[in-house]
Image: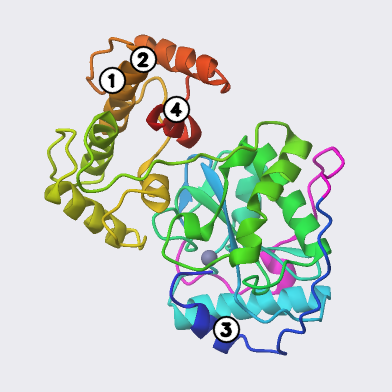
Amino acid sequence: MVLGHDLRRRAFLTGTLAAGAAAALPLAAATPAPAAEPGIADCATWGARQPSSPLTLVPAPPHKIIVHHTATPNVTDLSRDQAFRLARSMQNWAMDDRRWIDTGQHFTVSRGGFLVEGRHGSLAALRGGAQTVESAHCTGQNTLAIGIENEGTYSAVDPRGEQYAALVELCAQICGQYRLRPYQIYGHRDFNATECPGDRLYALLPQLRRDVAARTGGDPTAPVWPLLHNGDTGDRVRALQHLLVRRGATVGVDGSFGPATEQAVRAFQTQVTATSDGWAGNQTWHQLVVPVRRGDSGEGVKATQLLLNARRGAGLTVDGDFGPGTEAAVAGFQSGAGLTSDGLVDARTFARLLA
Ligand SMILES: [Zn+2]
């Protein structure tokens, strides 16, 4: 659900009130199964309107999946027709109220466990595995993340078992097609100042990562970020400053978290609609970090190099060029930290470098 508009959408979509009849979740790990494509109803099947403008295809796979709830009533109508009605009303809300060119999210999971395509092209891009349809579900992440809406409001109750099982299948399919790792599944509140996807669904995300990992393989352990604030000093602050510079801040990279760094953090948080508190924590790191690998260059590489020097005495020149020396140092760090030794600095490797 899109930040700040939950109540408007809730009003727009009001149907029957929540019946509080959510079924208990099967929390046992899912049985490994071939990743057959779950049946996702495409836009034509549910009667979508055409987009108001051409959609943008990002020529790269996404980095992550972001889970939302629709903040609509927990309906007791579990039919396919209800899933399609929801898809149409969400598209109408997005296009008529928000003036977006199409539905915001890529996919939706109904209370009855039906899967539908949201924004046009999402299903074709998923099948291709190499492109991402630019979306409108999470400020700061719309070119980087697949957005999944779950019908209902999961602040005080869990999703229904069928709905959760369909979400697991969809996430496994997305991870398989885009070669994502189960720990790259997040909740909307990891990025923006929002209650979405509700306390109960958010609390289920570690289980979701484990259940997806049981299907696709891979480690489901999500990154844990340090909390940095005014008065802190050292290499972690220096790394933060490099990432802020990468995003356009004019802050000195001096390893000292003073008023200028705090102001830069606040400005960045406002820009990406994260909680604007001037502290660099979960939302801020998630928004700042992008994967870097051999061949990349720039401030994100500098941050990686200085942390490799600090953690491993790698002796790298902090020049922002990710060459073979940096790659070897990354692989060595990963091996020592019990991570997959692939030389790719994604969010989890970067978080371990900061730890
Ligand atoms: Zn959301």
Q: CA distance from mark 2 to mark 4?
A: 10 Å
**Among the two numbered marks 1 and 4 on one chain, the one whose residue lies closer to the N terminus:** 1
Residue shown at the point (13%, 45%) measured from the top left: 250
Q: Amino acid at mark 4?
A: Val
Give the color scheme: rainbow, by chain, secondary structure or one colour.
rainbow
Q: Amino acid at mark 2?
A: Thr
In this rendering, position of residue 61 left or right of residue 148: left
Residue 73: in magenta span: no
| Residue occupied by mark 3 | 10
Few, some or many C-alpha atoms within 10 Å of disc 4 (few <14, some 14-19, many ≥20)? many
**Among the two numbered marks 2 and 1 on one chain, the one whose residue lies closer to the N terminus:** 1
Of tags 1 and 4, the one toward the viewer is: 4
Q: CA distance from mark 3 to mark 1?
A: 48 Å
Residue 127, position as x, y percentages in the image: 67, 44
Magenta segment boundaries in residue numbering: 28-54
**Among the two numbered marks 2 and 4 on one chain, the one whose residue lies closer to the N terminus:** 2
Question: Is 97 in front, or is 273?
Answer: 273
Few, some or many C-alpha atoms within 10 Å of disc 1 (few <14, some 14-19, many ≥20)? many
Q: CA distance from mark 3 to mark 4?
A: 39 Å
In this rendering, position of residue 292 left or right of residue 9: left
Helix, strand or loop for disc 1: loop
Which labelled disc corresponds to residue 345? 4
Residue 51: in magenta span: yes
Q: For residue 179, which quarter of the picture?
A: top right
Helix, strand or loop for disc 2: helix
Q: Are marks 2 and 1 in contact (CB under 8 Å)?
A: yes
Q: Amino acid at mark 3?
A: Arg
| Residue occupied by mark 2 | 326
| Residue occupied by mark 1 | 321
Q: CA distance from mark 2 to mark 1?
A: 8 Å
